Image (tube, rainbow, N blue to C red):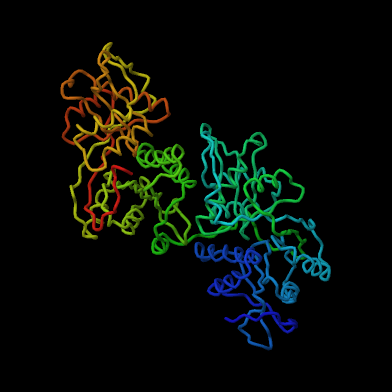
Amino acid sequence: MSLRINIPDCNSSHLQKLAPSKWKELRDYYLRDWPYNMVGYYTLDNFIRWIRIEPDIKNVAIYVLRSNNRDPHAMINATFLIVDRYQLFFNTLYNTNTNSLRRALSLLDWSPGYKVSTFLDRHKEIVLDIINEKGLTLEWGNSATPMGYFERQNAADLELNCPDDIDLRPLSEKDCEIADALWPNRHYGSLFLLKRLAKLNPSIGAFKRDTNELVAWCFQLQAGPLGALQVKEEHKRKGYGSLCVRAMVKILAANDCDTFACVSEGNDASFKLFKSCGFQFIDVCNWLRTNPIKALDTDWEKEYSNMGTCDELLNKCHLMKLQPPMWPELRDLYLENWPHNMVGYYTLDNFIRWTRLKGTIRNLTIYVLALNNRSIPERTSGSFIIIDRYQLFLNSLYGQDTKYIRMALHLLDWSPGYKVSTFLDRHKQIVKDVISEKSLTLEWGIESTPIAYFRKEAANIFEINCQNDINLRPLSQVDAENINKIWPNLHYGSLFFIKRIIELNPSIGAYKTNTDELVAWCLQLQSGALGVLQVKEGYKRKGYGSLVVQAMTKILAARNSDTFACVGQNNQASHNTFKKCGFEIIDGCNWLRTNPIKPLNINWEEE
């Protein structure tokens, strides 16, 4: 498909619907003269992504201008029109003859009425001329919005600074109902618009951690700009709008995209917000809405299309790193079917807390299945894989199809060798199958540990009867070396592991009052399980094990968390301790370690 530039006379031409297979070629013409062709590029790229996810998407068509006399397959100036439901998008290459755009707009059937969206200042006079020549009337007139621009190369320097009482996560359908109800641009069809944007494009919401209230949000519109950015009235002037903008910049940069936003003229607060985030204003976009001559009989609020069958989806999926702002949404999928999804929830919650405390953590990655570089955990049983140094954690939602976690494990690079940790009985056969199919060898085989569970509501039932000669307090980094030396699971990298757990997670030690000797201890592992529970040899059978378990149960209950522990299959003493403390066995988890094929050159003790 060739391109013809600056044809002086476009009158001998016609509009032709462009097949989706040609959309990418059209889009790539807009890579020239960046960022002046940015809006055209991102508009086309949006619909290319959408049609990959929803091949049967309804009421979307892309039209190009073809010459009647010259090469009939050539596109003139890469001029295009996109009709998406009641919205109209268009563009033509920067610094080319605009006669082709004028001709294309004159050939369009305007009778349904359109919300003409995100059209550039250099095209405004053409649009107004066409509306005048066709005798169209406007529901509302031209709204000019200066365009702020942020290059993706600068995103790493943009600090997020998320407050401790705020969770950031993508918006759900239910969140869209709140956003639509408060949106100043709310209109017939806008709820479907926001729901579709949240489903198919990046979005972000700021939620109060204690109440889960949505207080601020931001979407990405079809042409690529940030849009529907809003902060609830009672939460303004707290930096939540800036927080959402910064999060979106980082999400888009991770997808190799620049960010731009259209800011309403006269909205000084928004201008200041985007300038404070480092945006530069480089152009102006415009919006207007024409009245219909003959309205379409379409219910814009109910127009949904399916996303293909599970098997079709599975064949198209790939493994993708999930960016930290997306982790809370994945975690919250695991709130259902409690406590069957408890391990998945607490594993993700652990790493969400860690990144808040430490920022970027080395050698930590969360992978999910994705389609066209867009994560879709809600459609792939919430399947995830976490690589934390030499440890691997995995999970998928209880009662849902396990073929997705099987596929994710197949796609993973197993060459470094992993300690596969805390994986549930329902995933044991899958892990064994993948290891067999990949011909991996084991340093040590599967160790099964029943899961003992204690509900937070029951933590107030018992009192901690701490003996007078014992002090309870959190463990210190000095304690880590003593704990590691006598830990039955001592291994290369375990000292750093214990030090980090003590630094970032709850822990408890029982110390002799007169000598300050540490005699018993308990930590919380990355999966949320109690672990490294131990009593020194000379102090066993004195109730110190039960004491530290009960103390940890109360500490976690105060943080609104249930408690669970993985108890060695043949460790009768531990079974008795947890049973005595009121724990019940509800499931089983497993552990194994694969040998490396090509080990990483990393000193796990000095990391």
- Snapshot quadrant of residue 148: bottom right
Task: Please state if 335 lies on the left or on the right of 295 as rendered.
Answer: left
Q: Nearer the viewer, residue 524 or 246?
A: 246
Q: As drawn, is 165 to the left or to the right of 423?
A: right
Q: Residue furthest top?
A: 468
Judging depth in this view, the residue of 432 and 245 nearest the camera is 245
- The residue under the point 49% across, 60% down is 307
Which of the pair 363/411 is nearer the observer? 363
| Residue 529: % across, % down | 31, 35
**Would you identify the image quadrant in which residue 27 lies?**
bottom right
Q: Residue at x 68, y 86 (%)?
A: 68
| Image coordinates for residue 546, horizontal then vertical, percent | 25, 22
Q: Considering only vertical position in the picture, is 156 above or below 106? A: above
What residue is drawn where x is 32% and y is 26%?
Answer: 475
Q: How many marks?
A: 0
The image quadrant of residue 80 is: bottom right
150 is higher (above) or lower (below) than 4: above
**For the C terminus, which image quadrant?**
top left
Q: Position of residue 18 (x, y in %)?
A: 60, 75
- In the picture as drawn, the residue positioned furthest to the front comes out as 606
Q: Position of residue 271 (x, y in %)?
A: 70, 47
